[in-house]
Amino acid sequence: MLNPFEFGFVRTGVISPELRVADVEFNVAEIGASIRRAADVGASLVLFPELGVTGYTCGDLFYQSLLLERARSALSTLARVAAETKIAAVVGLPLLQDGKIYNCAAFLCEGAVVCIVPKTYLPNTQEYYEARWFTSARYALLDTIEIDGTHVPFGADILFRATNVPGCVIGIEISVHHEIDSASN
């Protein structure tokens, strides 16, 4: 059987599991099951939706400390699943850092949270109100965040190695939602 790594390829899964708004326990169980299924079909890296740990549409619930605490603690659970399956994962969640809430993507590999990337460009027009709840990465004062007693790199300009995939360097950006007006194309 051919090994895709020998040719510079990475088998990647993009998964949008069933989620429940503000139900971190349910969402983490769904994300964990999805990581296991992705590993079963040979994926080395799996990507999940923006704010998938809590759901994107929590609104003012993002201000609730209990929701933020549960989202942060979910990283340990998901990192363990990533370690068990030998897969790298990118999961989205809100994180409190230095008194501000950030819309983040966490990179998990080999049982650890490797880095946290906060979103830089927050849409704040039409149905998007992200600037109401979140702070842009541009305003982050610290370049590390404490997760389970470990200082993890925190920032929008981080490149890192997926140690489970030889030669794979990863960068993450959480993009702004744009709708394309098909009538003008």
Image: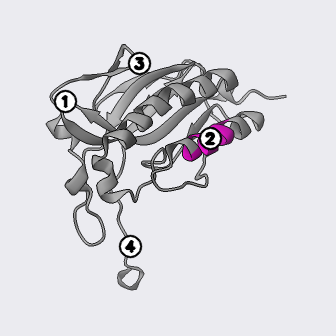
Which residue in the protein does label 4 denote?
180
The earlier-in-sequence mark between 3 and 1 is 1
Q: Residues within 10 Å of mark 2 (few under 14, many from 20)?
A: some
Left or right, 25 with reference to 184: right
Q: CA distance from mark 3 to mark 4?
A: 41 Å
- Residue that extends furthest to the top in the rendered view of this protein: 150
The earlier-in-sequence mark between 2 and 1 is 2
Residue at x 66% of width, y 42% of height: 34
Dot 1 lies on which element?
Answer: loop
Which residue in the protein does label 1 denote?
98
The earlier-in-sequence mark between 4 and 1 is 1
Left or right, 16 with reference to 95: right
Residue at x 37% of width, y 46% of height: 174
The secondary structure making up most of the magenta span is: helix
Which residue in the protein does label 2 denote?
29
- Locate the C terminus by quadrant: bottom left
- Locate the N terminus by quadrant: top right
Which residue in the protein does label 3 denote?
148
Q: Nearer the viewer, mark 3 or mark 4?
A: 3
Looking at the rendering, the stretch of residues picked out in magenta corresponds to 26-35
Left or right, 183 with reference to 136: right
Q: CA distance from mark 3 to mark 1?
A: 16 Å
Task: Please report contact status of discs 4 and 2: CB closer than 8 Å, yes or no.
Answer: no
Identity, as a three-letter code, of the amino acid under mark 1: Asp
Identity, as a three-letter code, of the amino acid under mark 3: Asp
For residue 41, which quarter of the picture? Answer: top right
